[in-house]
Amino acid sequence: MRIYLIGNDGITLCHEAPATVNEGEIAVASNDELQAAPLSGRRLLALWNARPVSRNGGKLAAARH
């Protein structure tokens, strides 16, 4: 299972649920949880733009997989 920890410094991928979540962090495991998370559109856009660029296709290649 993939768990994404969204914090002030970006997104961290975990393979199991963390024992604790620090203040200001949000743990998300599904699209429904992401939509229910208290994240503004501006924050989501900043996270999207902060993703690393791959060498073969840029940011759009990551979105297709």
Image: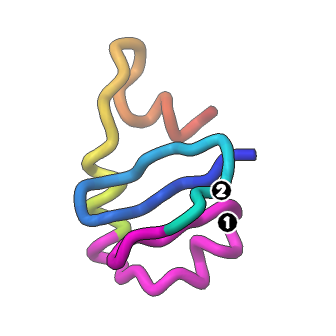
Q: Is residue 34 magenta?
A: yes
- Residue 20 position within the rendered picture, expressed as x and y whole percent measured from the top left: 52, 67
Identified at 37% across, 34% down, the residue is 59
> Where does the image place residue 61, in percent across and percent down from the top left?
49, 28
Check disc 2: other Cα within 10 Å, few if <14, some if 14-19, many if 20+: some
- Where residue 63 sits in the image (x, y, percent)? 52, 40
Q: Which residues are magenta?
A: 21-43
Identify which amino acid the numbered label 2 is placed on. Answer: Ala
* Residue 34 left/right relative to 54: right
Which quadrant of the figure has residue 8? bottom left
Residue shown at 59%/78% (left/top)? 35
- According to the picture, the residue beneath numbered tag 2 turns out to be 17
Q: Residue furthest top?
A: 56
Hey, what amino acid is under mark 1? Asn
Q: Residue at x 67, y 66 (%)?
A: 31
**Farthest front residue in view:** 19
Q: Is residue 11 above or below residue 25?
A: above
Distance of mark 1 from mark 2, alpha carbons? 16 Å
Identified at 34% across, 64% down, the residue is 7
Which residue does the numbered mark 1 point to in the structure image? 31
